[in-house]
Amino acid sequence: MKDFTLTTIEKDSEAIVLLHGLKRTFHSMDKAGRVLAGYGYKIVNASYPSTQQKAETLALQCIGQAVKECEAAEVKRIHFLTHSLGGILIRYYLSVEAVDKLGRVVMLAPPNRGSEIVDKLGNWRLFYLLNGPAGLQLGTDQDSLPNRLGTVNFEAGVIAGNKTINPFLSLLFPEANDGKVAVSRTQVDGMRDFIVLPYSHTFIMRSDQVIRQALHFIQQGRFAQ
């Protein structure tokens, strides 16, 4: 039995910025936002055009605006909960910008070391049409954006999924995966904690267990064991 000891804080005293993934909208993070708001957190469910620009531009525009909103609300700490590409955006943002009240960051299914899907399908025109310039930045080669970002220097927890709803795409991986990212490639040097849960890339952010584990890390700096 996991020890989910979670605390309700003073209303809106801390914020959690939600960052959705590639080809998704902020609505994909709605459930997480509702659950986390129930524990007193100010929720900033950020929206960005994930398929229209490179990750660097998306990060600076989207996260910069979200941080300003949190600062205007005079919260004590600013945490982040990201899905997929959102994890790469926050890694890039924090490599070039400082967040004075930075708390903890939880990444759900992030391609922290890239994805084999980009390696094998990235040359297809249809891939670019569907995923845009940011999608092409997520390969596994050393020069890909995730691999160039290096070690994280903030408190980060990573939750990987190991179930798939797309058996075709899963054939592109040599190891356990969530249908989009291999479990081992979600990890990043410098992370504080890591767990694998039985969910797919597509729906991991809607799992009650995942959301509670994310909040546990935000509050305690580790996942529940």
Image (tube, helix red, strand yellow):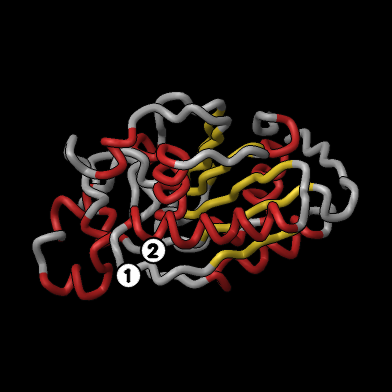
Name which residue lies at 51% across and 48% down: 108
Please, is residue 67 above or below residue 195 in the view?
Answer: below
Q: Can residue 1 be seen in the rendering of this structure?
A: no
Q: Is residue 167 left or right of residue 191?
A: left
Quadrant of the rendered image containing residue 170: bottom left
Quadrant of the rendered image containing residue 114: top left
Image location (x, y in percent) of residue 33: 69, 62
- The front one of 156 and 197 is 156
- The front one of 43 and 215 is 43
In the rendered structure, find residue 22 and report the number of the disc placed on it.
2
Image location (x, y in percent) of residue 49: 40, 71
Ranked by sequence position, the earlier of labels 1 and 2 is 2
Q: Mark 1 near mark 2, Cβ–Cβ under 8 Å? A: yes
Q: Is residue 30 left or right of residue 112?
A: right
Name which residue lies at 27% across and 44% down: 145
* Type of amino acid at the residue the image marks with label 1: Thr
Q: Can residue 88 be seen in the rendering of this structure?
A: yes
| The C terminus: image quadrant | top right
In the rendered structure, find residue 51 and report the number of the disc placed on it.
1
Please, is residue 104 above or below residue 108 in the view?
Answer: above
Please, is residue 150 above or below residue 165 in the view?
Answer: above
Label 2 SS: loop
